[in-house]
Amino acid sequence: MSSIKKLLSCVILDLDGTLINTDGVVSEVLKTFLVKYGKQWDGRETHKIVGKTPLEEAAIIVEEYGLPCEKHEFIAEIYPMFSDHWCKVKALPGANRLIKHLRGNGVPLALASNSPRASIEAKISHQQGWNDSFSDIVGGDEVRMGKPSPDIFFEAARRLNVEPSSCLVIEDSVIGVTAAKAAKMEVVAVPSLPKQIHRYTSADEVINSLLDLRPEKWGLPPFQDWIEGTLPLDPWYIGGPVVKGFGRGSKVLGIPTANLSTEGYSDVLSDHPSGVYFGWAGLSTRGVYKMVMSIGWNPYFDNKEKTIEPWLLHEFDEDFYGEELHLVIVGYIRPEANFPTLESLIAKILDDRKIAERALDLPLYSKYRDDPYLKTTSSENQRSLI
Ligand code: ADP
Ligand code: RBF
Ligand code: MG
C-alpha cells in the first residue's frame, strides 16, 4: 500500500492533452491554414505550443513560418476553423473514468485551461456527460495572465471556495505544472509527448497515463475498478502477420514476443498509452491463447519506435513468422518501466504473466476467448467489411 502524500480535497484538471487529445485536430487545421500561405506544416512546432496561450501559439506560428499576418489576424482566421473540428476530438484513455469517479464521490472538480472559455465549452460539449461534471471552468481569457502564471489556478481555487494547498492539479504540459506549483498546489504530471519525463522535475509525481493515477496517494477516494492487479478496459482489437522484431533473443530469455508490424496501426498505437496489457491471441491455423504484451518504447532498451510485443502464454515447438495473429486486448496491468538489470526486467515480466494468466480465468475476461475476431483471417475480415 503506497503512503499518503497529502490530504487533498479537490481536483483541478487541464483540458487539452490531459483529458482530450487535440493534437490531431490542431495539426490538421494548421496544415490546411498554412497551405493558403504556401507553407507546409511539418509538426516540428508541436512541442513549442504545448500548454501555451492562444496568443503565444499564434506568435510562434506566425514567426516560425514568416506569415504575412499579425497574430490577432491569425487567431481570428484560425479559431472558426478549429470549431468545426472539435466534434472529432477524443477523450484520452482514463479521462471519462477519472471524471466519473471523482464526480461520483463528490470531489469538487474544476477545469483550468489557457484556452478561451468559449473554446473550452465548445470542446467539452462533444464529450458525453462532461457539461455537468465540472463545478467550475476557468479559461485563459478570464484571468490577467495565462499559465505559467498561477492566476488560472488561483481563480479556480477561489471559485471552488477552497485553499490552493488542498487542490490536486493534473497537467500534461511543463507550463501547466509550473503554473500549478506557483499556485502552491500539488501536481501530477501526465506528459502528452513521449520520453519527456526529465522536463517535469517540479511535478510532485509524473505518471504515464491517467490509467496510472492513484487518487488515494493524495487522500482522495481510490478507484474501485482494479481487479486482482488488473484494470478492465473496453476491449480493443488489432491483428496482422507476425513480423521479425528486434532479434534481441527474447526467446533465449524465455520471453518470445510475436511482434506485429506497427505500419497501419499508428492510430491504435497513438490511441493507447504505452504499458503492459493482456488479453486473448488467435493464430488462424493453431488456436486461441492467453496473451500478455507490452506496448511502447521498452525503456530498458530505449527503442526509438513504439512497438507491440505480445507474448503468447503457450509453448510452441516452432516459430510462426508470417502467420496471421489477432489480438483482443481486455485489460491493463502497469506502465512500462526501466529496470536496473535484465534479471529484474525478466522477473517483472514473469509477474505480469502470472497476473494475466489468473485474470483471464475471471468471467469478465474469459468471455472474450470466444470472440469471432480471434478466429478470422484478414481476408475473411475484409470480406465482412464489404
Ligand atoms: P523477434 O525479435 O523476431 O520478435 P523473438 O525472440 O521475440 O524474436 O521471438 C519471437 C518469435 O518467436 C515469434 O515471432 C514467434 O514466431 C515465435 N514464438 C514462439 N513461441 C512464442 C510465444 N509463446 N509467444 C510469441 N512468440 C513465439
Ligand atoms: N520492456 C521494458 O523496457 N520495460 C518493461 O516494463 C517491459 N515490460 C514488458 C512486459 C511484458 C509482458 C512483455 C512481454 C515485454 C515487456 N517489455 C518491457 C519488453 C521487453 O523489453 C521486450 O519484449 C524485449 O524484447 C525482451 O527481450
Ligand atoms: Mg519479439
Image (spheres, grey):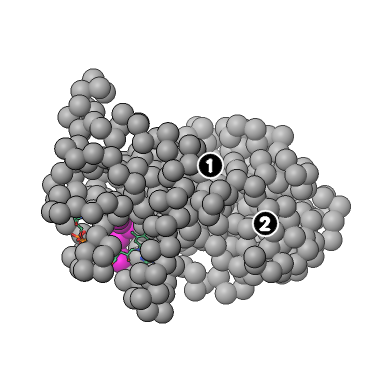
The reply to whether residue 72 is in sight is no
Task: Using a 10 Å C-alpha cutoff, classify the residue at mark 1 as few (fewer than 14 neighbours), some (14 to 19) or many (20 or more).
Answer: many
> In the orientation shown, which residue stands out farthest toward the right?
161
The residue identified by callout 1 is 91
The residue identified by callout 2 is 215
Is residue 302 shown left or right of residue 224? left
Quadrant for ligand 1?
A: bottom left
Spot occupied by residue 337 in the image (x, y as percentages of width and height):
44, 67
Task: Using a 10 Å C-alpha cutoff, classify the residue at mark 2 as few (fewer than 14 neighbours), some (14 to 19) or many (20 or more).
Answer: some
Q: Which residue is located at x 23 percent, y 50 percent?
A: 261
Spot occupied by residue 147 in the image (x, y as percentages of width and height):
65, 61
Q: Which residue is located at x 21 percent, y 68 percent?
A: 252
- The residue mark sitting in front, 2 or 1, is 2
Residue 295 position by quadrant:
bottom left
Picture quarter with the C terminus: top left
Picture quarter with the N terminus: bottom right
Is residue 315 shown left or right of residue 298? left
Q: Which mark is residue 196?
A: none
What kind of residue is marked 1?
Answer: Ala
What kind of residue is marked 2?
Answer: Pro
> In the orientation shown, which residue stands out farthest toward the bottom?
340
Q: Which residues are magenta?
A: 303-309
- Spatial CA distance of label 2 from label 1 is 20 Å
Classify mark 2: helix, strand or loop: helix
The reply to whether residue 360 is in sight is yes
Is the residue 340 above or below the residue 297 in the image?
A: below
Classify mark 1: helix, strand or loop: strand
Residue 105 position by quadrant:
top right
Spot occupied by residue 78 in the image (x, y as percentages of width and height):
50, 42
Q: Nearer the viewer, residue 198 or 6?
A: 6
Q: Are the residues flagged by discs 2 and 1 in contact, CB closer than 8 Å? A: no
